[in-house]
Amino acid sequence: MEADQLKNFIAQALAEDIGNGDHTSCACIPEDSRSTAELLIKDIGVVAGVEVAAEIFKYLDPEAAMHVRINDGADVTHGNVAFTVECNTRSLLAAERIVLNTMQRMSGIATLSSRFAVEVEGMDVKVLDTRKTTPLFRFLEKEAVRIGGCENYRFGLFDWVMIKDNHIDACGGIQQAIDSIHTYFEEKNLSLGITIEVRNLVELYEVLRRGGVDRIMLDNFDLPIMEEAVKIIDGAFETEASGGITLGSVRMIAETGVNYISVGALTHSAGSLDMSLNIVNPD
């Protein structure tokens, strides 16, 4: 994560939530009050967002002191305390919802990513995320994928070229699309990885005749056809499986021999991990 990007996210999230002031806390809590709170896990999964929470508290109260008991990426269960934090009470209450929303979402993604990673453990394949993320929250969702044990694909449209079916159809064909990419690269002095999506073996053979790509994405292939496609490619290009991949199918897909499996579900179908932030009364 970029520090400036995280700081900007925190500022926008606080502006969205606080507006012209947390009137409840300002009315009820003395300005100089300080409290200690603990982050209680109320679910089973993988925790993520602890480091982000620390930055949120520090943003609101530079004197905030957080004691981490469970680090990002650790397995957690109901009743675990991920951290305690001592902080200005008004700042603590202002941070509460943003910390919880962020950590619950990140932990849900990390938990699902961990389950996918376990399904292909020991196999020579990498499970990738996609761009199917929440707008403006992508950098944290992708961080959660990494925390959970899977890997990031391209961050956006700018850092990897992916020629998909719509590009091919709009451009007039596979060869035209690949030719256009290379012409564009020469004009713009660019050098990026290139993935091309194929929908059947006919398109696969077109790509193999033309070349000029780094990776071939086998989109929504039935398992026997995918296995045949991998054999046809025979290591000439990287291979990637995509399309409707679930926890129940990911290992069978990996067994076809593909190098990568891209899974939109890591982010678009992940739930949230239940947790709460509670002020702890001193003994």
Image (tube, grey):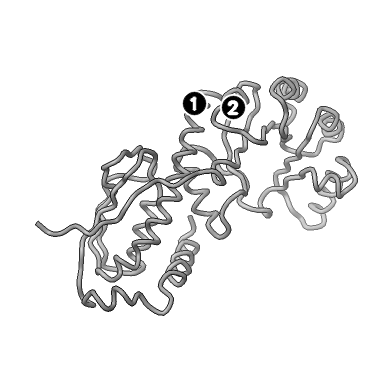
Position in image of residue 142 (x %, y %) = 52, 48
Report the residue marked by disc 2.
249
- Residue at position x 82%, y 35% in the image: 211
**Which secondary structure, mark 1?**
loop
Position in image of residue 249 (x %, y %) = 59, 27
Query: Does 43 sit left or right of 161 as displayed?
Result: left
Position in image of residue 270 (x %, y %) = 50, 44
User: The disc labelled 2 sits on which kind of residue?
Assistant: Ser
Give the mark, 2 or 1, whose residue is nearer the N terminus.
1
Q: Is residue 225 above or below residue 55?
A: above
Q: How many marks?
A: 2
Q: Is residue 53 above or below residue 34?
A: above
Q: Which mark is residue 121?
A: 1
- Residue at position x 53%, y 54% in the image: 139
- Residue at position x 82%, y 30% in the image: 208
Q: Nearer the viewer, residue 82 or 188?
A: 82
- Residue at position x 76%, y 44% in the image: 164
Kindly indicate the quadrant of the structure image that contains residue 61.
bottom left
Q: Is residue 206 above or below residue 59?
A: above
Position in image of residue 76 (x %, y %) = 33, 39
Q: Nearer the viewer, residue 59 or 269?
A: 269
What whole-number distance in Å separates the C-alpha atoms at marks 2 and 1?
14 Å
Instruction: Work out which quarter of the rendered image holds the C terminus and state it.
Output: bottom left
User: The disc labelled 1 sits on which kind of residue?
Assistant: Glu
Mark 2 neighbour class, 10 Å CA radius: few under 14, some 14 to 19, many 20 or more: few
Mark 1 neighbour class, 10 Å CA radius: few under 14, some 14 to 19, many 20 or more: few
Q: Is residue 198 above or below residue 33?
A: above
Q: Nearer the viewer, residue 172 or 277?
A: 277
